[in-house]
């Protein structure tokens, strides 16, 4: 937020350089605002760039205070406005210069249901106890923001040079708004993402608008005049009303009469989209990406089209995808749209699991009866063995995805199995600040590219990417944007974010970045499925009887389930597998004996701490909390907070599997090293199930 001094300088520079503070005629305001009449009932309206005395916004809302059913009207002036004091004296003395004014109204005389006269409006203003602010009235000032927080809807005509700053402020405080701006603002990096993601749009009346301009405005050859009262005017052909209140045209499809012709609709040199000359030329029979004039936004229905991005400079914002060049010639900026095709409901999701590991993602999705893994690929033979024995119906391939023969085999088997869904967590080691220059072309990201390459060849209806949380924030989200842009160019919609396994019944705090990519219908990320967390006690208290070195690969259950989660984990399992405790060295056991139940290494003498730097080493799990993230070294007593809550040992593979939400039917194969890798690297099945349930809910039959 700028302070008063810097705000004054900023606005004065804007006036001097752009002279872009225009005042709006009453009729222009009335013509637009009355379309939203029902939206204003019992609301507080804030006109935060409008002089209480001079602005037609304040006069309009006083005039219609009662028939709109307003609860409150707040208008604040900016002290250095070129219009200040042109109708009524704004300052009683020189001491008050530099201070904005505020008019705060909660009641307007009814006038027996008739509209107020100009004299009546002036009397309301004079009797409303307009007072001076401590600050200058800048919409970014502390006082203005305090009133913004109290408001419901902001209606104003801000200086065009500050339009993006005001929008950013309104979005930050989640306010409804109706603003006048210049249509060029649509391409701002702060504005276009709002339009693309259906968070804001154009109002009803856009294009030609006339405005009063300051006295010092220089004459222009066109679109400029002086009225009989000496007031200077300018008109703009590209003005717009910008809002996030609903408008009717967004729910009515445009009638398309043109037909696609490759000669009439050339393709860009650097992007797979066709150039559409005018809005009336949008072809009814083309399903690919179309580059249309920006004027589409005054008719755009998100129920008919989706916005893919824009073609402008190729760098202004994450959705500015390329420079619009055809046959070497730079064209004018365009909006990229694609027709929404009614989705085909899918009765069976046939899955290809890439980088499958032991199969947590597939196993979880198969808990929804509509999902079946047909083909799986992993480089690790032991993980593949575990996958195959637990999901025998899947065709498990062990091999390197970069090997042409392996890749051809995966694609061939997937096509024969009618795969319509791809899942996996491709590694992306090059997603670091150092690798930003190359992005997806960084050779360290080749596995990520291979994943997308197979997706492109199979064209599934949906695919899911899971990865580390940091992928979304690295280099201020630059790599995330690279991925999204690539997926959009492939013709898929993307919903992404961070999911925490504990929100889906997993007794573990484990955050993963998830991308759900689909053709046609958008598939949002799933919402949490549990109100209260599943705890470590819920997960493993029935297994608390082994000491260090005890247990076996296979054994009988020796206790009964004591929680619903344990009952769910035991369902269908006749024996207990993988419940064998690590045979710790005596020195490790002696250390654990000194650590009370549910505590950590703070109870160890300094002589026993060694050179370990991490606070969580030698920690015990806490019964009534979720576990921290299970990693691939959970069986080492010195590693993190993976020791049993009270027994002097690390947790067993079965306990770790329970905490990961693998049920007891799922058996892990291989040596201790391989098993802990399989468990620690897995996606928790209950998290995977929630993703599958969400996909089935949106596009399943």
Image (tube, rainbow, N blue to C red):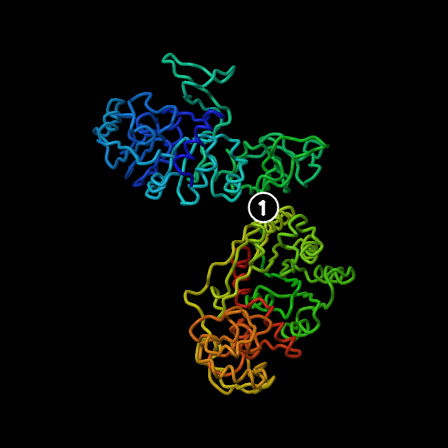
In the rendered view of the protein, which quadrant contains the C terminus? Answer: bottom right
The residue at the point 34 percent across, 26 percent down is 56
On the image, which quarter does residue 304 sit in? top right
Q: Is residue 489 above or below residue 619?
A: above
Residue 275 x/y as whole percent: 65, 34
Q: Is residue 188 above or below residue 668?
A: above
Q: Is residue 557 above or below residue 414?
A: below
How many circles with numbers are drawn on the protein? Answer: 1
- The residue identified by callout 1 is 341
Badge 1 crowding class, 10 Å Cα cut-off, few under 14, some 14 to 19, many 20 or more, is some
Relative depth, front residue between 570 and 1: 1
The residue at the point 43 percent across, 45 percent down is 172
Can you name the residue that lies furthest to the top here?
A: 228
Relative depth, front residue between 374 and 323: 323
Q: Is residue 369 above or below residue 152?
A: below
* 323 with respect to 662 (left or right): right
Residue 191 x/y as whole percent: 50, 39
Residue 321 x/y as whole percent: 62, 41
* 321 with respect to 25 (left or right): right
């Amino acid at each position: 937020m700028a302070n008063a001094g810097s705000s004054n300088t900023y606005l004065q520079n804007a006036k001097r350089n752009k002279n872009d503070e225009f005042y709006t005629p009453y009729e222009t305001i009335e013509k637009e605002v009355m379309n939203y009449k029902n939206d204003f009932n019992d609301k507080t309206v804030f006109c935060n760039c409008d002089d209480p005395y001079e602005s037609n916004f304040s006069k309009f809302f006083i005039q219609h205070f009662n028939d709109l059913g307003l609860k409150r009207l707040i208008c604040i002036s900016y002290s250095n406005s070129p219009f200040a004091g042109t109708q009524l004296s704004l300052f009683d003395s020189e001491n008050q210069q530099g201070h904005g004014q505020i008019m705060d109204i909660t009641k307007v005389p009814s006038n027996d249901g008739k509209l107020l006269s100009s004299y009546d409006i002036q009397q309301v203003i004079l009797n409303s106890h307009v007072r001076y602010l401590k600050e200058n009235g800048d919409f970014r000032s502390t006082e203005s923001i305090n009133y913004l927080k109290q408001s419901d809807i902001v209606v104003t005509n801000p200086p065009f040079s500050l339009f993006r700053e005001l929008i950013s402020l309104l979005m930050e405080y989640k306010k409804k708004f109706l603003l006048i701006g210049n249509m060029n603002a649509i391409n701002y990096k702060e504005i276009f993402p709002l339009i693309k993601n259906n968070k804001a749009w154009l109002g009803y009346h856009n294009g030609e608008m006339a405005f009063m301009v300051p006295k010092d405005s220089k004459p222009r050859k066109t679109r400029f005049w002086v009225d009989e009262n000496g007031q200077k005017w300018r008109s703009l052909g590209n003005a717009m009303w910008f809002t996030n209140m609903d408008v009717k045209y967004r729910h009515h499809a445009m009638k398309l009469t043109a037909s696609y012709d490759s000669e009439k609709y050339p393709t860009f040199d650097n992007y797979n989209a066709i150039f559409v000359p005018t809005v009336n030329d949008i072809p009814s029979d083309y399903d690919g990406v179309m580059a249309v004039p920006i004027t589409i936004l005054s008719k755009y229905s998100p129920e008919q089209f989706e916005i893919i991005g824009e073609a402008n400079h190729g760098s202004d914002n994450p959705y500015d995808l390329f420079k619009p060049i055809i046959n070497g010639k730079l064209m004018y900026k365009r909006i990229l749209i694609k027709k929404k095709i009614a989705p085909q409901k899918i009765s069976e999701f046939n899955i290809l699991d890439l980088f499958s590991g032991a199969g947590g993602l597939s196993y979880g999705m198969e808990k929804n009866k509509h999902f079946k893994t047909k083909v799986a690929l992993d480089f690790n033979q032991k993980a593949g063995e575990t996958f195959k024995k637990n999901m025998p119906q899947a065709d498990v391939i062990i091999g390197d995805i970069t090997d042409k023969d392996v890749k051809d085999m995966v694609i061939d088997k997937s096509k024969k199995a009618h795969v319509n869904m791809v899942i996996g967590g491709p590694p992306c080691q090059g997603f670091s600040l150092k690798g930003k220059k190359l992005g997806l072309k960084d050779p360290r990201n080749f596995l990520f590219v291979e994943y997308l390459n197979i997706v492109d060849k199979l064209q599934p209806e949906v695919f899911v990417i899971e990865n580390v949380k940091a992928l979304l924030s690295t280099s201020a989200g630059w790599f995330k944007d690279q991925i999204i842009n690539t997926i959009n160019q492939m013709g898929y919609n993307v919903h992404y974010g961070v999911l925490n396994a504990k929100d889906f019944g997993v007794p573990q705090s484990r955050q993963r970045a998830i991308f759900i990519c689909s053709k046609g219908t958008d598939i949002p990320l799933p919402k949490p499925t549990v109100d209260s967390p599943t705890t470590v006690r819920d997960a493993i208290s029935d297994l608390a009887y082994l000491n260090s070195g005890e247990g076996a690969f296979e054994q009988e259950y020796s206790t009964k389930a004591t929680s619903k989660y344990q009952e769910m984990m035991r369902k269908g399992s006749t024996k207990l597998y993988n419940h064998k405790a690590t045979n710790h060295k005596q020195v490790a056991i002696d250390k654990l004996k000194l650590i009370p139940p549910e505590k950590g290494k703070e109870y160890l003498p300094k002589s026993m701490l060694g050179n370990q730097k991490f606070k969580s080493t030698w920690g015990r799990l806490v019964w009534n909390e979720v576990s921290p993230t299970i990693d691939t070294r959970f069986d080492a007593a010195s590693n993190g907070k993976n020791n049993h809550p009270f027994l002097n040992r690390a947790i067993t593979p079965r306990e770790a599997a329970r905490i990961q939400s693998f049920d007891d039917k799922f058996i892990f194969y291989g040596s201790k090293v391989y098993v802990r890798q399989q468990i620690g690297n897995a996606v928790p099945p209950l998290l995977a199930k929630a993703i599958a349930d969400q996909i089935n809910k949106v596009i399943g039959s």
